[in-house]
Amino acid sequence: MIKDMEPLARSIADKKQDMASSSEGTILYILTRFPVTTETFILNELREMRRQGIKYHLFAFRLDREMAAEPPYSEVTAREIPRPCTSAVFSANGRVWTKRYRAAYALLRTRACRRLHHFFQAVYLADWVKRHNVRHIHAHYAYHSASAARVAASLADIGYSFTAHANDIYRSRWQMREKIENAVFCATCTGYNAGYLREHYAQSCPDRVIKVYHGIDLKHFECRPRNRALPEQAPFHILSVGRLREKKGFTFLIEACALLKDRGFSIKTTIVGEGPDRKALETLIADKGLDSIVRLTGSMPHRQVRKLLEDADVFVLPCIIASDGSRDGIPNVILEAMAMRLPVVSTTVSAIPEAVEHGSTGLLVPPGDTPALAEAISRLVSAPGERVGMGDAGRRKVAKDFDLTINTEALVSLFRNVMENRFPGHERAHDGC
């Protein structure tokens, strides 16, 4: 009986929240999925925005209610966008199409959303924002979340923006030019991404693409100074964290471990993460005779990853550009390792050099170069003083360029300017349908 009351209680709570926020302008945030364990940077952004006084409603196309009810995700309230065949979506589409037939038809005809069901869900959001005093829409990732933001904003006569990250820039390019040209702004998390977007999609409006780094909350990554020497007879601990897929370059890390073993180095390597390449990596570990040296742990809670960051001697993530063109920007875990005073060994791919400064906060090697990777790791094994110096420099770098409060302030400033109609180009950043 109590369980049966949960949907009703949730509905009442949602209505109370809606009424509480109806007197002032808010932002609608659109995500593809929520929560996602590898996207803690979005959660951090949402929490910090709220702390800085920005009110928002969070919607996701796919909501894991069970996971969303657990800390830390329970700190934000998320709603799932109703499925296309629900009465809520039918009713909303009826209202919007009755009032905005020509605009809706124009967006539908030009395939502003790649998939038809996402279009009807976007129309639902347009109706929702009209009834809840939403002043602006923001989406994360340039996938269908950004497409939905574009459609909903156009039909609701408000502005929209989105944050582009990595694969959504280099692989899924559906109407990227149109999304940027019609947005108030397009934020992206690296200078490398910003340059690429301006060159390929925003030639007519380069100023609309704005770099806003992901932020790290340094309070959550307090770490004592590193020891210069390893404990007696302890193996050198190499840590890597990421989804087990081609672009992370784990194949080259395993091969580098084989070279280090052959040279007589005492090492152990922990690779945290899960993904489609697990079987292939397990086979490679076995073929190289590294079962006692390299361990694949699978996914782990963030608190356990943090403990590993504290215990490791070096963080290694040899990213590459995958065969399908996918690549990382600045993997957040690199910033977390730097915040924990770990020296980082990575590659020159994409925006990684914006965080890892070769010879200062870590070492960079060419992507896919196993001997160079092994040489960089061996250099740090043999130079404890350099490890400590790079680790300290890494934390200073994160505090200077990647602080959560400072970077969120930049995003909050953009939102405030938009909602107060003080953003350059706000009037023309619209489909005009």
Image (cartoon, helix red, strand yellow):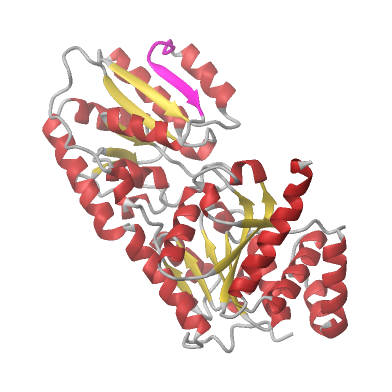
Q: Is residue 365 visible?
A: no
Residue at 26% x, 43% y is 222
User: Above or below — where is 86 with respect to 106?
Assistant: above
Residue at 44% x, 52% y is 329
Q: Residue furthest front?
A: 1
Depth check: 429 or 367 in front? 429
Q: Is residue 14 left or right of residue 356?
A: right
Residue at 47% x, 22% y is 296
Q: Is residue 186 left or right of residue 108?
A: left
- Image coordinates for residue 372, horizontal then vertical, percent: 30, 33
Q: Quadrant of residue 113?
A: bottom right
**How many numbered marks are there?**
0
Depth check: 345 or 214 in front? 214
Q: Quadrant of residue 374?
A: top left
Quadrant housing the C terminus: bottom right
User: Above or below — where is 169 with respect to 202?
Assistant: above
User: Above or below — where is 390 with respect to 7?
Assistant: above
Quadrant housing the N terminus: top right
Residues in magenta, as a range: 289-298
**Residue 293: within the magenta?**
yes
- Image coordinates for residue 64, horizontal then vertical, percent: 66, 45
Residue at 68% x, 84% y is 157
**Residue 424: within the magenta?**
no
- Image coordinates for residue 365, horizontal then vertical, percent: 32, 40
User: Above or below — where is 60 with respect to 37?
Assistant: below
- Image coordinates for residue 204, horizontal then vertical, percent: 53, 81
